[in-house]
């Protein structure tokens, strides 16, 4: 089984990538100035208290020791506990001091798991919208290079790639939610709250998809198998739908693999703006509160998703085009 | 007719000159013929000129507060005044001047970070691809690891508490963006390594470093640099996002991000404060993207689409 060998090698590489990611983010957080303990106990607490708690939390140990301890727990499936979020849900502040060494803090794994489904839902919606629109624009463009469908595609993708998504989110929320009241969007109550953020995200993705699709289709149309299909008397729509699109989906999948972390980054920002209860809000707040375990957990999750999606992309791509090898 | 045949040899020599020109020159010539490139260039130059001179000419200070002038609408809306073509914000500051100052920072950060990430990324990529072997494996896993963390998480984690400055923002964005350049430069160096001229130079006794810096790099880098133009636009958007989250260049210095984030609070009554910077940023991005896409297309046609 050739494919199993590849899978095994990719998994080993993947483990290394996730470990590297953990090491990078772990070190960065501890090297960059900004003491989480100071934020936990509040600005009024004397330095001796800060020092005492920091030592109790193990934050004054050498970084390799801290990292080793973190990996040990990670190996047991434990991402640690948040520094600032107690289990009750309220965020601790200097006024009501919660001792982070005690077990009343929320577990990072739990926090991420409750938010992740919302983020996945948003990302899936966005990709679905983006794919539909990109195929509608990109396929005709690829079939008529240099003619008007190509120009329309070029114009739309140049427009979309030039719109700052965080600004578009604000403007659409104003026009569609507040003024016209067509779609709700701030916060989350039901599925309809996902639509507007998903549209904003898809605007961010569409230009890349359209460009890849147009280029690969116009190149594929010059291939011999297309001419062979015509000679055999196959109707054009059948050549395109059965043979060209099948091959054109490979570069599209590869693009998705490379861009998955950009997409995730985009999701986080858009979620934050729409007050959408996914990982975005959690991440931004975690960073602002120096909640190290939470930031690490999220970074490890995103690198895991990156590795996982790329392995899936490779497998699917090989099954579409068996000529590929690694 | 006679005259034309006299000119024929000259036309021929011009033609040979263009075919001999280096790929970089051909890409540039090819791109500069397209309409998109020219439109983009004109838009960008106009914006640069306005951003450079209007704040001086108008004599308005982007930080000057004038409470009696607050929430003046833009000129094309009823109640607008010519003194403030795009209106004023909640403190009576001129929106246009603030946006133009923001545009300066945006361009400096976008351009600066792309230049820096190009140098870091291509440097590492060239080394990785040219020497191949074990270093290559390690470097590629590191780039994978960094590609797997979203730029924005990396950027906000670093800028989160340390007070962001122009320099630190440029540095953070280039740290976040170098892996893609490393990958592209590595792939190019890997294929370049096997070329005839590299072996020839090696036989003649040139050192690896000499071959890399004087022969391989000048061959590989220009096409990558052309496509990097698109990244300037991408980094300008990131600068906007950072500013919006309060992690950009700090107020009172106006940036697109912090103007939009301020304006968002008043968006229902004074929509122009948050809208104007977005439109201006969008126009600037459009100019840069048109130039970048034309360069990319020209590169693809010069290289036959195989790079």
Image (cartoon, coloured by chain):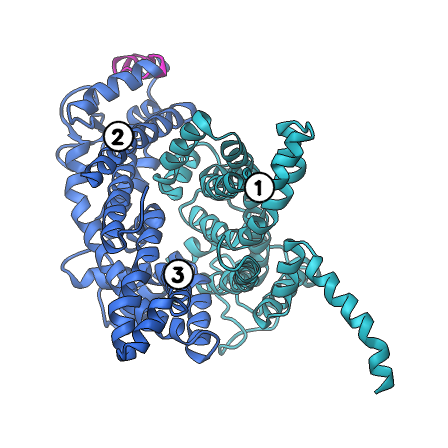
Chain colours: A blue, B cyan
In the drawing, what numbered circle is on residue B68?
A: none
Q: Nearer the viewer, residue B210 or B73?
A: B210
The residue labelled by disc 3 is: A212
In x, y percent, where is residue B223? 58, 51
| Quarter of the view holding residue A131 | bottom left
Q: Give how far apart the Cα atoms at labels 1 and 2 are.
A: 33 Å
| Residue B17 part of the magenta segment | no
Q: Nearer the viewer, mark 1 or mark 3?
A: 1
The residue labelled by disc 1 is: B195
Left or right, residue A37 beside residue A99: right
Q: Nearer the viewer, residue A205 or A292?
A: A205
A195 vs A40: above or below: below
Chain ID, mark 1:
B
Q: Is residue A166 among what the camera can see?
A: yes
Same chain check for tags 1 and 2: no
A3 vs A96: above or below: below
Left or right, residue B16 beside residue B163: right
């Amino acid at each position: 089984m050739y494919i199993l060998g590849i899978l095994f090698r990719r998994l080993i590489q993947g483990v290394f990538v996730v470990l590297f990611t953990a090491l990078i983010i772990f070190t960065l957080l501890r090297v960059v100035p900004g003491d989480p303990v100071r934020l936990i106990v509040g600005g009024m607490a004397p330095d001796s208290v800060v020092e005492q708690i920091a030592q109790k939390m193990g934050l004054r140990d050498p970084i390799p020791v801290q990292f080793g301890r973190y990996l040990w727990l990670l190996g047991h499936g434990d991402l640690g506990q948040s520094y600032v979020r107690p289990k009750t849900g309220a965020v601790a502040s200097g006024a009501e001091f919660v001792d982070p060494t005690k077990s009343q803090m929320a577990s990072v794994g739990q926090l991420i798991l409750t938010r992740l489904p919302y983020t996945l839902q948003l990302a899936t919606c966005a990709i679905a919208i983006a794919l539909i629109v990109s195929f509608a624009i990109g396929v005709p463009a690829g079939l008529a290079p240099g003619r008007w469908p190509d120009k329309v595609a070029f114009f739309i993708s140049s427009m979309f790639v030039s719109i700052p998504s965080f600004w578009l989110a604000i403007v659409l929320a104003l026009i569609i939610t507040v003024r016209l009241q067509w779609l709700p969007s701030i916060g989350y109550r039901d599925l309809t709250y996902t639509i507007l953020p998903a549209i904003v995200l898809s605007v961010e993705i569409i230009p890349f998809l359209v460009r890849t699709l147009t280029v690969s289709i116009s190149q594929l149309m010059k291939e011999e198998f297309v001419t062979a299909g015509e000679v055999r008397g196959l109707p054009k729509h059948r050549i395109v739908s059965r043979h060209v699109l099948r091959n054109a989906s490979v570069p599209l999948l590869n693009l998705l693999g490379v861009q998955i972390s950009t997409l995730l980054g985009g999701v986080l920002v858009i979620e934050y703006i729409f007050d959408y209860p996914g990982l975005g809000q959690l991440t931004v707040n975690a960073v602002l509160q120096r909640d190290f375990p939470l930031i690490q957990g999220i970074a490890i999750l995103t690198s895991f998703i990156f590795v996982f999606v790329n392995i899936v992309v490779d497998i699917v791509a090989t099954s579409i085009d068996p000529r590929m090898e690694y | 007719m006679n005259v034309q045949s006299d000119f024929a040899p000259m036309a021929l020599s011009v033609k040979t000159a263009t075919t001999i020109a280096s790929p970089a020159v051909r890409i540039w010539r090819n791109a500069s013929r397209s309409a998109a490139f020219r439109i983009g260039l004109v838009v960008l130059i106009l914006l640069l000129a306005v951003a450079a001179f209007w704040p001086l000419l108008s004599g308005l200070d982007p930080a000057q507060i004038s409470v009696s002038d607050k929430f003046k609408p833009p000129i094309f809306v009823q109640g607008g005044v010519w003194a403030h073509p795009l209106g004023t914000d909640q403190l009576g500051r001129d929106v246009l001047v603030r946006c133009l100052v923001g545009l300066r920072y945006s361009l400096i950060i976008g351009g600066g970070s792309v230049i820096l990430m190009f140098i870091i990324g291509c440097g590492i990529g060239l080394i990785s691809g040219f020497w191949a072997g074990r270093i290559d494996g390690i470097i590629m896993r590191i780039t994978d690891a960094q590609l797997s963390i979203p730029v924005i998480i990396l950027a906000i984690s670093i800028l989160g508490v340390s007070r962001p400055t122009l320099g630190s923002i440029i540095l953070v964005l280039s740290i976040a963006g170098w892996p893609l350049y490393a990958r592209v430069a590595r792939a190019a160096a890997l294929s370049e390594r096997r070329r005839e001229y590299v072996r020839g130079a090696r036989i003649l006794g040139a050192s690896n470093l000499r071959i890399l810096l004087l022969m391989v790099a000048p061959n590989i880098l220009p096409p990558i640099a052309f496509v990097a133009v698109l990244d300037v636009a991408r980094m300008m958007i990131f600068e906007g996002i950072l500013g919006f989250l309060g992690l950009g260049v700090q107020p009172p210095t106006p940036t697109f991000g912090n103007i939009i984030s301020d304006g968002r609070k008043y968006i229902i009554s004074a929509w122009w404060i948050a809208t104007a910077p977005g439109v201006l940023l969008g126009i600037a991005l459009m100019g840069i993207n048109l130039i970048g896409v034309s360069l990319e297309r020209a590169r693809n046609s010069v290289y036959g689409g195989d790079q």
